[in-house]
Amino acid sequence: MPDLSKNRIPDNVKKIHLIAVCGTGMGALACMLKDMGYEVTGSDHKVYPPMSDFLARKGISLMEGFSADNLSHRPDLVVVGNAVRKENPEAVRMEEMGLCFCSMPQALNRFLSAGKKTLLIAGTHGKTTTSSILAWILYKAGLDPSFMIGGIVRNFDSNYRIGKGDYFVVEGDEYDTAFFDKGPKFLHFDSTVTVLTSIEFDHADIFRDLEHVKQAFGDLMGKIAPGRLLIAWDGDKNIDSLIQNRDCLTERYGREENSFWKIGQVFVKPPWTIFDVLKKEEAFGSFKTKLVGEHNLLNALSVIAVADHLSVPVSAVSEALETFDGTKRRQEVRGVIRGITVMDDFAHHPTAVRETIKAVKPFYRQGRIIAVFEPRTNSSMRKVFQDVYSLSFDDADIICISKPPLLEKIPPGERFSSERLVVDLKNRVKDAHYFEDTQSIIDFLVKESKTGDLILIMSNGGFENIHERLLKAL
């Protein structure tokens, strides 16, 4: 274990090195620091778009692979990503050299959020989209926000922004902070407003069970200062149990009868969804968005609640929602060939898979929904969700399940079985298929897909560039 007395940020920082720089958050931090005038270097063992392209455009000096030599220039500060183990050669060398180091949330607090009011978006699902909508609304309202988000916001073509306004929007991740700090990242932020979208079991590599997850979110609830605002979804019993008897102000949102914020009537008129909002049972406004699905309307509703608390005019909120272009890798259309749409989505948790397929179906009724799923997260490669996944694809017409790409990382007795999932889906009379490799999926899709179909590709990784390869093959 490193000497934690070095776990601080010195006053006169000029050179900063980031270990595991190609993660979405770390990459954004690197670019932000570069924009602020620091000399930035970074290292990682594997890169893939869009972050690799993002770093290249910013001129970040990127080193392939981890090596003690990557610290030979003796940086003033080392930022350690949470994917870095203490045995990492750069982490070992950092300690040997006595370099100052910190975690990503600590760096954010020092370099971006200092002196600002933090708006924290937390929850198992919807953090990225919700944070993105909020950042865009504040920007359109002229509040010049700063933000740090776990996805590329299409309106900004960035997942970070350094603004001069009072507000800092941050996606509050429940994942652990670093090998020297196993607490959740979101505990590092002192929020003025906190949004809580959902609580489910996830991240099976660090959480034992649902109670362990709830404990982390309970710690977050306990950190919210008296008088600060918590905006929490009303459709989650796990949330219900954690927000009782808190000193903070609380507003619930969703569809429950007594909630402070409620969705009213909804009209789907592709490519638009129009929905009414009620505040304390009275009409608040009618809004128009290109976002699809109930889960995204709830995300938007939570942001409307935040914006109202910050006195953003309803007209500005309405204009921002109508012009919000979404986030990359969240229901992102990558191309349309011969009337066949190829869509990319980050969905990997069973609930996210189910809600994503359900959301897009009304917009592609002229053809079939072909769902392509790659289980590659630390949770989805474990059998913890083995039975649940078979219930997540009901709205798909054809289902393609790939072999997990990194299964050797999981102990044999804990491994998820794609073959078994396909058997379970077939037992539920679903048209499901198992594939050993990505090229086989592409060959199948080229042969099977027809004009009007939507090919929905769901993975939290690069999936061997399946999207571009498929579009080329089509």
Image: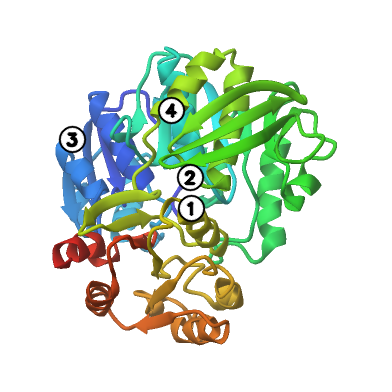
- The residue wearing badge 4 is 322
The image shows residue 69 at horizontal and vertical percentages of: 18, 54
Q: Are marks 2 and 3 in contact (CB under 8 Å)?
A: no
- The residue wearing badge 3 is 58
Q: Are marks 1 and 4 in contact (CB under 8 Å)?
A: no
The image shows residue 32 at horizontal and vertical percentages of: 30, 31
- The residue wearing badge 2 is 292
Which of the colour schemes (rainbow, by chain, secondary structure, one colour) is used? rainbow
Residue 7 seen in this snapshot = no
Is 297 placed above or below 371 here?
above
Q: Quadrant of the C terminus?
A: bottom left
Q: Is residue 35 left or right of residue 329?
A: left
The image shows residue 132 at horizontal and vertical percentages of: 44, 34
State which quadrant residue 84 falls in: bottom left
Select label 1 or label 4 by which is in front: 1
Give the residue drawn at x 38%, y 80%: 408
Q: Amino acid at mark 2?
A: Val
Q: Residue furthest front?
A: 366
Select label 2 or label 1 by which is in front: 1
Q: Are marks 2 and 1 in contact (CB under 8 Å)?
A: yes
Q: Earlier in the sequence, mark 3 or mark 4?
A: 3
Q: CA distance from mark 3 to mark 4?
A: 30 Å
Q: Amino acid at mark 1?
A: Pro
Q: Amino acid at mark 3?
A: Lys
Q: Are marks 4 and 2 in contact (CB under 8 Å)?
A: no
- The residue wearing badge 1 is 362
Q: CA distance from mark 2 to mark 3?
A: 32 Å
Q: Earlier in the sequence, mark 1 or mark 4?
A: 4
Q: Nearer the viewer, residue 97 or 388?
A: 388
Q: Are marks 3 and 4 in contact (CB under 8 Å)?
A: no
